Amino acid sequence: MGSRQADAGGDSAGDGGHAPLARRHLLLRWGLPRDPRASEHLLGFVLTTVLTVVVTRGYLQLAGFPQIGGGGLHVAHVLWGGLAMALAMVLVLSFAGPVVRPLAAFLGGIGFGLFIDEVGKFLTQDNDYFYRPAPMIMYATLVLLMIGADALHGRREHHPSEHLAGAADHAVAGLVGGLSPRRRAVAEDLLAQGRGARGSAETEALLAAIPDDDAEVPDPFQAVTIKVRELLHAVVTRRWATGVTAGLFVVLVAGGAGTLALSWAGDSGPGWARTTALVSLVVMVAVAARGWSVLSADEYRGLQWMRRAVLVNLLITQVALFRLDPWLAAAGLAVALLALGVIAAEKLRLERLHEGGAY
């Protein structure tokens, strides 16, 4: 842990964030602390994008692809997407503090979904909205976005000063509007993780001076996040995690195999997509089997292997399946994300047991 903290901020372990600034990571020296909750906002952005594309394509297909305009004009929904993304930028650039970020992620996700849904029109000379590789291109773009986000936020542990900056960010909002119990709890958790960094005592005093106020901007993702967490918590506390994960794997493999069978039967889709999907399914099953074989001896290690199997599906299998059948691939994507959530919840439970000495 100490070496990771050194990597995170360029300071030696246990320095409490007081080492010379010149030894810190370049982003911190530039005054660019990462938001500790950025991964949640980015995930919300991506999921909103996916949902927007699915809803848009579903509505257009059911409504017979209506068009806004007339007299030679066609107001494509890519324009509404651009407007939504611009509004998201205006919000982020206009208001200080963390309150606006979930709303901006939601609005930006809708805008990006409407924008990328028309990618086929801009890759073909005849402006073909129904360009067959378009769904695969959309999905691959979002995968690359999430890989980039993971490289920025998931590979390097947050420096204590970044947690403290997050707590101070909540204090910025509280100075003018108070803090609701939920936001105060978030701020105090960040403060605890940043305690010892330069300015922590002052930030603690500032948070203590901010009055309580229940009024807050609605978080578009909060209700869904709470429900998902409750569901996953119920699964792992009832010891269903292993069975649920196994069931979801069966659904993933069966769904992928079924999509392949339909593609071969109808001779639809390029050969490279079918080959990629088949090979990656085999690899996924092999990795999952490895995880299952060590699960009884070391549950945490087994779950690590199961997670790798799901990532193979998300990063490789689903890309190929989106080229073969976008609707079936979208269903498989939902199952894969659910499996990833169950595995993550169970791993977190095991980590907490280990920290408490009960594991």
Image (tube, grey):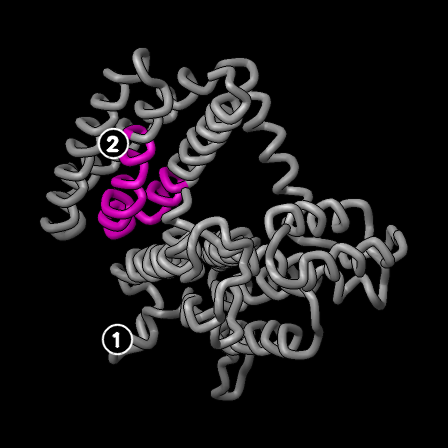
Tell me if I can see residue 322 in this picture: yes
Q: Please check the rendered image and state whether residue 60 is part of the magenta-colored stretch, yes or no.
A: no
As measured in the structure, the alpha-carbon distance from the residue carrying label 2 to the one carrying label 1 is: 30 Å
Q: Nearer the viewer, residue 50 or 131?
A: 50
What residue is shown with label 1? 124
Q: Helix, strand or loop at disc 1? A: loop
Image quadrant in which the N terminus is located: top left
Where does residue 185 sit, x and y in percent of width and height? 73, 45
Q: Nearer the viewer, residue 319 or 152?
A: 152
Tell me if I can see residue 59 in this picture: no
**Region rendered in magenta:** 305-333
What residue is shown with label 2? 258
Where does residue 241 sit, x and y in percent of width and height? 45, 20
Residue in the picture at 21% in, 29% down: 287
> Is residue 126 positioned above or below 226 on the image?
below
Residue in the picture at 67% in, 63% down: 199
Residue extending furthest toward the top:
296
Q: Is residue 307 left or right of residue 12?
A: left
> Is residue 92 positioned above or below 241 on the image?
below
Q: Is residue 336 left or right of residue 262?
A: right
Q: Please check the rendered image and state whether residue 309 is part of the magenta-colored stretch, yes or no.
A: yes
Mark 1: which amino acid? Answer: Thr
Q: Residues within 10 Å of mark 2 (few under 14, many from 20)?
A: few
Q: Nearer the viewer, residue 48 or 209?
A: 209
> Is residue 276 positioned above or below 290 on the image?
below
Q: Quadrant of residue 12?
A: bottom left
Mark 2: which amino acid? Answer: Gly
**Dominant secondary structure of the residues highlighted in magenta in the image:** helix
